[in-house]
Image (cartoon, rainbow, N blue to C red):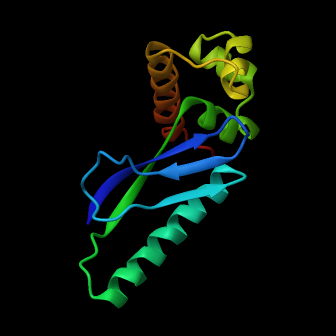
Amino acid sequence: MRTVKAFIERSSEGDYSVYVDHDNKTLNYGIHGMGGTARDAVDDFISAYKTMKEFYMQKGKKFVEAEFEFVYDTASFLQFYSSYFTLAGLSRLTGIAQGQLSHYVNGTRNPSRRTIEKIDTSIQDFAKNLSQVQVV
């Protein structure tokens, strides 16, 4: 089974979509998901995958099975995890001003590639540190 990146993005209207890059030739079909939240969009995407698999089986066509690695754009990540991270806490974690993070969440500005990498590295480092914590 192949692992394929599925991108989660928030639209300017606030809805979410999940899709596989069209340039990725791993799959022999296209699927996408939509929803009012990132979770709803992922669930819709998984449902579309299952529906496509059934369709291909009914038609006797070869279906390329896949596992999906869900990847967020910056605004979607910040919005989805905003109930877990405050912007103040995320600002302390990343060194990026809280006001700037707010612009990314609201979609009024887009982060540069360097800023995206800074956020990603900070979150990954935090996750590694957190995974080593033991509560007794």
Which quarter of the figure is the N terminus placed in? bottom left
Quadrant for residue 91, please give it.
top right
Quick check: 12 left or right of 48? right
Residue at horizontal 54 percent and vertical 38 percent from the top: 133
Quick check: 122 left or right of 95? left
Near-viewer residue (84 or 98): 98
Quadrant for residue 101, please give it.
top right
Residue 3 against residue 130 in the figure, above or below: below
Q: Position of residue 103 (x, y in %)?
A: 71, 18
Residue 27 against residue 130 in the figure, above or below: below
Residue at horizontal 63 percent and vertical 40 percent from the top: 10
Residue 54 against residue 22 in the figure, above or below: below
Residue at horizontal 26 percent and vertical 81 percent from the top: 61
Q: Position of residue 122 (x, y in %)?
A: 50, 22
Quadrant for residue 64, please give it.
bottom left
Quick check: 28 left or right of 77? left
Near-viewer residue (105 or 133): 105
Q: Position of residue 26 (x, y in %)?
A: 25, 56
Report the number of discs: 0
Residue at horizontal 46 percent and vertical 31 percent from the top: 124
Q: Position of residue 31 (x, y in %)?
A: 45, 61
